[in-house]
Amino acid sequence: MSDLSPRRAMTDFSFALLASSRTARQGIIRTPRGDVRTPAFMPVGTAGTVKAMLPQSVVETGADIVLGNTYHLMLRPGAERVARLGGLHKFMAWERPILTDSGGFQVMSLSKLRKISEDGVRFASHIDGHAEFLSPERAMEIQRLLGSDIQMVLDECPALPAAHADIEKSLALSMRWARRSKAAFGEQPGRACFGIVQGGTYTDLRVRSAQELTEIGFHGYAVGGLAVGEPQSAMFDTLEATTSHMPRDRPRYLMGVGKPDDIVGAVLRGIDMFDCVLPTRSGRNGQAFTRTGPLNLKNARHAEDQEPLDQLCRCPACREFSRAYLHHTVKAGEIIASMLLTWHNLTFYQDLMQDLRDAIGKGECEPFAARFLARYLG
Amino acid sequence: MSDLSPRRAMTDFSFALLASSRTARQGIIRTPRGDVRTPAFMPVGTAGTVKAMLPQSVVETGADIVLGNTYHLMLRPGAERVARLGGLHKFMAWERPILTDSGGFQVMSLSKLRKISEDGVRFASHIDGHAEFLSPERAMEIQRLLGSDIQMVLDECPALPAAHADIEKSLALSMRWARRSKAAFGEQPGRACFGIVQGGTYTDLRVRSAQELTEIGFHGYAVGGLAVGEPQSAMFDTLEATTSHMPRDRPRYLMGVGKPDDIVGAVLRGIDMFDCVLPTRSGRNGQAFTRTGPLNLKNARHAEDQEPLDQLCRCPACREFSRAYLHHTVKAGEIIASMLLTWHNLTFYQDLMQDLRDAIGKGECEPFAARFLARYLG
């Protein structure tokens, strides 16, 4: 993994740590489709599109990688169809790396009539109700058909809070599925397979999960089953107890997180990768992220505000339009409001990641985080 | 109007005919905010946005001018507010010319509880029901507050078919309102006021209307009250009888038209300017215009079609994506489908206008039109 000779770098997946600031890490994931600077935020491109954005605009925000959802893509347009069309990168005109989840989380959150067995999970499509089946083997087959650069194992993602015994039982299944997922992934030069640490907020289970996955051996390790309703402090406590048991030389990915303050806190605790619908979904709902906290553009106080959202921001929403215009187009339900606020929010997230990378590079992540959080939360 | 010396060209509104091909005309409208090449198609930016497009993207399609709707803007965000925010150009980040309609047509088509008197029209807002009033003087005041480069007189737009006596009575009111509108427009250097020829499909009334407006004297002349349900042949017959009575040295604008074949036929009959929601609205509904006719991307036959919409088109939808991707995103209701198909359709319209200008410049408009229509309608 650490051999960065030119020939290997062209065809292999690798991760290199470049700097650290206490437990915070700065690094780079190299893939044949391009590098991913870490800590990295991955915009969510659920159904083959980062909603309300053209791919070139996503690049301009500073994103090195996007996430695709196996659950949505398997239902529509279908993994085999995407493969016949040349793979997900070509389909959605995104040449850079793509990480796909395994579909497990969405099966739990979106579909009804689901039934979990040792073999996998049967469920009804939320689009047309037709019966579907997802096993570790099928989840990996779908991700291979999509042509995903980073493929996630299928896991069970239990709701919190839950009793220790229930989480332990669920975790055992997830670990058996992780082993089957890894076997199904096989050998795919240049592509990676990530395991997912589960265990709820129970430290002993998180540690056990991290150790079992490390024994199986993955290109990277995710932390799943957090940010599902528990307090932020519980998430941070769990992270602190978990990341120290995850391999130092592999990327660590906190799934589905999160708010800017969640991300800053998780970077301080050794996380390298994030994804979340928040910047895109909030943008479509009239909410903008700023250095002094989120702003609801629907609010009437913006109606005659000639100032941009953020004087210093480089996105088109801030360079070319006033808060008054954003207020008007949000109120009028105009698509341009979704386009501009999504672009702004993704730019805000990517600029935050760049600031974090810079701060870690200087060994000053904690003071940066303190300043950012004081201003953002204050 | 024909003095194009540098000083005047900087501050005045003018129109120059550059070429003609039988009755088809090629020309240029010069305004302090930029030139408009005619025949011109104006994308509709109803509420301060060409829906699903950023202003720079509208420029890239080849548009020299956009249209704004007085009715929508007076209700939200309000003309006085737009004026306080620096005018419509600054508000919507569109530096080039803007034409605004007078609001009359939308009052008839969108609002309920409307009551027309000699003074003007009382109506209820379609947004929140509150009472509004539009007179010739208020319509011109709103357009002045918006900072519109080409301002339209308030007219009454009767539904077709209608009896000669009814159209005659309506026309008389429209002509009195045209006189009041012109007086209210006053002197606005660099800006233009256009009259609107009415008269339904009655040739005698159209001729009378054109003559009365010419006596009042306007910077340009529109044809209103067509493409409201009558057959295309009736529209063309009416146009032929009308344009010959409109001043040769002023731009002629056919309001709310239309389909590509409508535009081609109207250019042949001496029209210089067009606006229509069709390319933008169709784009949001999954319909694409192509040289061989419109295409419905919802249709399942596109599901695995790797070809672009149009091999020769320069828009991002055609350069970067397949018909299969457009089909998928239309079916999934993704915003990117509206963005891409709107961009494509506006590019198609602007390329058609450029082709028409080129053909007229070569004196070959009729053979071009015949070839285009044979392919488009065939």
Image (spheres, coloured by chain):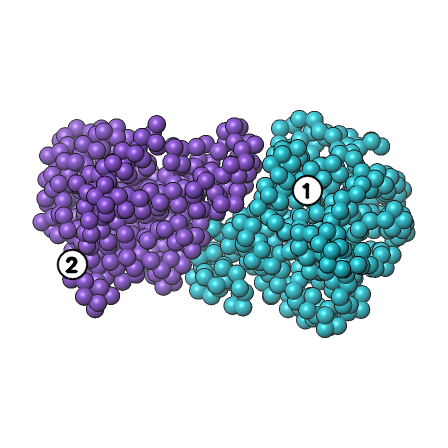
Chain colours: A cyan, B purple
Residue A313 drawn above or below residue A250: below
- Left or right of B42 in this view: A150: right
Q: Nearer the viewer, residue A70 or A97?
A: A97
Q: Quadrant of residue B156?
A: top left
Expressed as whole percent of the image width and height from the top left, the position of residue B253 reads 23, 45
Expressed as whole percent of the image width and height from the top left, the position of residue B328 reads 56, 36
Mark 2 residue type:
Met
Disc ID at residue A147: 1
Residue sticking out furthest to the front: A7
Disc ID at residue B1: 2
Q: CA distance from mark 2 to mark 1?
A: 62 Å
The subunit carrying tag 1 is A
Q: Nearer the viewer, residue B296 or A313?
A: B296
Expressed as whole percent of the image width and height from the top left, the position of residue B19 reads 19, 49
| Rendered residue at 14%/36% (across/down) | B241
* Secondary element at image label 2: loop
| Rendered residue at 24%/66% (across/down) | B10
For the N terminus of chain A, the image quarter is bottom right
